[in-house]
Amino acid sequence: MERPSNGGILYHEVQEANLCAVHCVNTVLQGPFFSEFDLAAVASDLDGKERQVMLEGAAAGTFSAGDFFSEESHNVSLGGDFSIQICPICLSNPKDMAFGCGHQTCCDCGPDLQACPICRAPIQTRIKLY
């Protein structure tokens, strides 16, 4: 993806509401490439594909899709929380370690931290998530 240079200046986007996924993606891409509406459309498409997979599995008798269909979207909420479960430090690994404050990172980044990267609370406990 080629785009014009911004003269070496880092792009920073002020986070609004709970739109941390939008902020995170645009910061990684170094520009305002996605809006909350773009990510909501992606989440909606993903919901549709998940429902299709669940229907196919239910039709094959592999499992019951009833529980899945009774729930709302797992990918986006009306409050703007997009379910992107990646480490806020490396932005590539899944979150699989929780701290006493409740925030999470991956097991590659978490052990070296002295304070939570989200709330800055001192880390006293680390819990491996499975």
Image: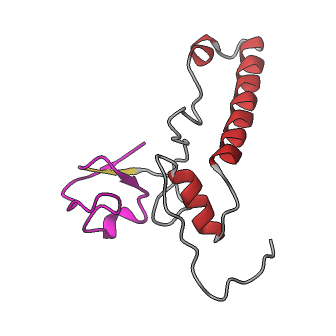
Range of magenta residues: 101-130
Does residue 36 belong to the magenta stretch? Answer: no
Say if residue 19 shows up in the picture: yes
Say if residue 64 shows up in the picture: no
Quadrant the N terminus occupies: bottom right
**Residue at image coords 68%, 55%:** 34
* Quarter of the image where one finds residue 48: top right
Left or right: 46, with 113 as reference point: right
Residue 77 position in % (x across, y down): 54, 33
Residue 41 position in % (x across, y down): 72, 40
Residue 15 position in % (x across, y down): 48, 57
Left or right: 111, with 3 as reference point: left
Q: Main secondary structure of the magenta part?
A: loop
**Residue at image coords 60%, 67%:** 28
Instruction: Out of 35 and 2, give the one closest to the viewer.
Output: 35
Look at the picture and state if 84 lies above or below 66.
Answer: below
**Residue at image coords 47%, 46%:** 18
Residue 124 position in % (x across, y down): 18, 57
**Residue at image coords 25%, 49%:** 101
Look at the picture and state if 59 lies above or below 123.
Answer: above
Q: Residue furthest bottom?
A: 7
Left or right: 32, with 104 as reference point: right
